[in-house]
Image: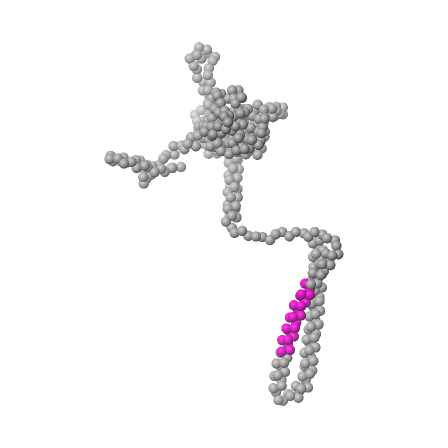
Amino acid sequence: MVTLRQRPTVATTEPEPVLENCVDDLTILSDDEDSPSDAAVKHLRGSWELASVLNFLNVFRPLISENLKVTAEEIEMGIIDSDATNAQLHIALLKGIPPVNNKSLEDGDAWITALCKKLDPWWPSIANGEIPLTANKGGEISGYKGLDSTDRLQFLKALCELRAQQDDARKYIQENANEGALNPCFGKRKLGGDGKKTSYWFDGNDILGYRLYKEVNEVSKSAKARKNVFSDASCFCWETEATNLDEFQRVARELSSSKSSSLAAVGKTIETDAIPVVEKFHKKKERAIKKKMRQEMFVSANISRPIRFTRSCRNRKPVIYTFDEYDKMITDAVEDTDETDRDDEEGIEQQSASLVGSNDSCEDTKMKSAEDVSKTEEGAPESDNGDVKEIEKSKEDSEEKIQFGAKNRMRQRLTRNSALC
């Protein structure tokens, strides 16, 4: 990534020199200049203590915490920034070292005080040199946050060493050893080397991730050592060669194209044994990232939508086997039926009124014709009687329909209530 930084203007009488790689008074910083965090990560990956801590977490994960799911990159950034991930890791390790006070460990930064108190008496046997920090009435909290990332890594490494000396850890090792063959995670896998001073190791799991380490064993003889042929001073150096799929593939290509047959064999071993495992882990990680993105998009979409109130779920009524409830149910059904009957009667009366009005208009029309006066006088009673009979008949039919509808609704309501009960 190319970072653009504004060039400061300086007042001077001399002509300003022309700077290369400048665009509109912006100086381009090359990618070779690492940021402070990148430099700290690179420095950590060059120490063997980080490889030892990651291997310890891989081996003793069942004892530490099954719920502690952090990657190696998160552990690195936690050591550098002293964030919540770093605190979570230290608390999980401190809980396995008696005496334990869980309430005090969960209280803010109190775990730093517990860390200093537990490591102070054991430091000479589990680490080199003097302890960088001791308990000092709360002053150790700010002191720990001001430590260098290398010193924090020393604290974490010493805590892992002390955790491995507990009874449950020793029992865990003995149980796996008694099964006939040690668990594969109990040791790093050596992929090979040049046969002299360089070796390549493969270690990791699906939670921490997988890494390729390079071990360099340099032998330097001092002036005193020259007097004794059998005495020499060995210096081991561990480097993290690859942490992701691209880096594994790059290292495999470089070693495969090496003129040394042993290093070329290591490159082929990485291609056949290590890269397939890393590819599978890489695909799994990508799927997890996509799933998380979809969930975040779904949550953001739901937040942006207006709130809608849906109908609540229907609950079954409690069963009551009493005559009072039954009588009340019948009474309510009869009242509903009476209201419906009243509405139907009003509709019939309006209909009959309209029929009478139409008959009157027809009668007026008939009386206007002079030729049919006698016929109208004789036939009027018969027509009136016929209309009245039709109205009465329609009333009877409507009353029968109303009664039938009321009985049918009553029957349906009783059936529905009995089903709910």
Residue drawn at the location 53% of the way across and 30% of the way down: 111
Taking depth in this image into account, of 18 and 416 the one nearest to the observer is: 416
How far from the left and from the top, in percent, is residue 261?
Answer: 46, 24
Compare residues 318 and 161 and report the one nearer the observer. Answer: 318
Give the percent coordinates (x, y) of residue 290: 51, 41
Locate the N terminus and report the quarter of the image it occupies: top left
Single out the residue that lies furthest toward the top. 227
**Which residue: 38% across, 37% down?**
3
Q: Is residue 303 above or below residue 160?
A: below
Residue 250 image offset from top left, x and y in percent: 45, 32
Q: Main secondary structure of the magenta part?
A: helix
Residue 33 sits in quarter: top left
State yes or no: residue 355 in magenta. Answer: yes
Instruction: Report the front residue among 324 and 74.
Output: 324
Displayed quadrant of residue 412:
bottom right
- In the rendering, at what x and y percent does residue 262 appear? 47, 24
- In the picture shown, does residue 353 fall above or below 254? below
> In this rendering, does residue 213 appear at all?
no
Choose between 167 and 134: the one closer to the eye.
134
As drawn, is 227 to the left or to the right of 21?
right
User: In the figure, residue 419 lies in which quadrant?
Assistant: bottom right
Looking at the rendering, the stretch of residues picked out in magenta corresponds to 336-357
In the image: residue 215, left or right of residue 17: right
